[in-house]
Amino acid sequence: MSKRLNYLSLMLATALPAQVAPVATEALTLEAAIRRAWSQQSGLQAGEAMVDRAKAEAEAMRDLNLPTLSLSAGLMRTDQPMMAFGMKLNQARITQMDFNPASLNKPVAITGVGGGLTLSQPLYTGGRLTAARKAGGAMAEAEAASQSYRRQQVALAVVQAYFGAQVAEQGQVYAEDSLRQAREVEHFVQARVDQGLLLKAEGLRIRAYRAQAEAGLVEARQRVASARSGLALLLGQETAPVTLITSLVAETRPSPADLPGTRGDLRAAKFQWQAAQQGVKASQGSLLPEVGLNLGLGTMHNTWSNGGNWSEVSLGFKWNIFSSPDRRRVSSAKAMERAASYNLRWQEQVAGREVAEARLTMESAAARIKMAQEAVEASESVRALRQARHREGLLPLTEVLDAEAGLSGARTLLLNSEYELRVSRAQLSLALGQPIEGVQ
């Protein structure tokens, strides 16, 4: 008998999450919940900031081919021989006396104010700048694709939390029904015990059963509170005082069609591979020569109206014929490209398995729903019949308790199966890279 009571207690407890929901102030559909999570959840907002950062980095990489314009200005006072002579020369005030060895060796400290404007333009860099620009663009695309996938993951989590809260609340309803039935049976049995028509042990047994039903209801209420708080966290709220109006049982519609390559994480992995390929080209470009053009204007004055001006044009060539660190960086970049390639292949394999698993889960859940519906109908009839026969003294109390346990198990199976079907449909959409619940 104790085994039956323990089993019944377990079924009541697993009648799925539950606790009295907060006072409803708003009707919330699943679509509205997903959109609210997308707009208010701090985790996704952080992801959006990362996308903005990646875009800014890509724009910086894109502008590497543009010229650089630099402005400089400064005040200097020195008696260092070479600097003093050069400053006078820049100020266009060299005289014959400045070539006196005594003046050259020990000049008097002089002051100068000057400035310059320089334009630098890279002409050839071995393809490094072009590769960097393409790599930056690919990384920005990868971050955007990752954010898109994160949004879909959040949507799936909202589906799980939204319907998890509904299942929890329905589990609480079932727990309340079981407790109500237990109290009615207890009242009837206790009256018979008082009349001497039943053994005192029967009264103690039903009292224990009722206590277990009360404990199951307390646990069910706690599960509702937990489910609600989880949903509120996803929605970016402290509480979720809403009525969840989207039905757990979705209208029958065809399963999502396979659309390979549309998943955000797969697109991100592909862009990361492309960025790694450009990284190899950029590192190889460091082994090639570079050519740059500089245009400059400068001025140096000792007074506001007295000073010198000059201009310069230079075309420079530089080639690190041998650089061990640069060659090592090429090997590092090639290893990174191989890693990105293998990661893309792995992600594709994982995606294929996730699609297959989601489809199997859907099929299994759909089959269990049909059986669970039959079990619930039959168990409800059995409970009503056995309670009636027990009141007539034709069945022992254990038969009534067994019927209650069977009904709790069937209800739990039905709720779990309906929940699993709805969630596995969302998981299949995620695996295929399609909008969760059709929410764009």
Image: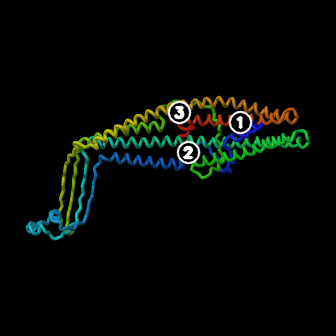
Q: Earlier in the sequence, mark 2 or mark 3?
A: 2
Residue 54, percent from left and from top? 41, 46
State which quadrant residue 102 falls in. Answer: bottom left
Q: In this view, does 389 lie to the left or right of 118?
A: right
Q: Judge by depth and name the residue closer to the eye, 288 or 22.
A: 288
- Where disc 3 sits, the SS reads helix
- Residue visible at 8% across and 67% down in the picture: 101
Label 1 sits on residue: 411
Residue 229, placed above or below residue 434: below
Label 3 neighbour load within 10 Å: few <14, some 14-19, many 20+: some
Q: Do the residues labelled 2 and 1 touch (CB within 8 Å)?
A: no
Q: Is residue 191 left or right of residue 313?
A: right
Q: What residue type is labelled 2?
A: Arg
- Residue visible at 89% across and 41% down in the picture: 192
Q: Is residue 288 visible?
A: yes
State which quadrant residue 370 falls in. Answer: top right
Q: Judge by depth and name the residue closer to the eye, 312 or 344.
A: 344
Q: In which quarter of the image is the N terminus?
A: top right
Residue 252, percent from left and from top? 63, 32
Q: What residue type is labelled 3?
A: Glu
Q: Is residue 184 visible?
A: no
Q: In this view, does 163 lie to the left or right of 260?
A: right
Label 2 neighbour load within 10 Å: few <14, some 14-19, many 20+: some
Label 3 sits on residue: 354
Label 2 sits on residue: 35
Q: Residue furthest right?
A: 195
Given this view, does label 2 or label 1 mark the residue nearer the observer? Answer: 1
Residue 163, placed above or below residue 73: above
Q: How far apart are marks 2 and 1 (CA)?
A: 32 Å
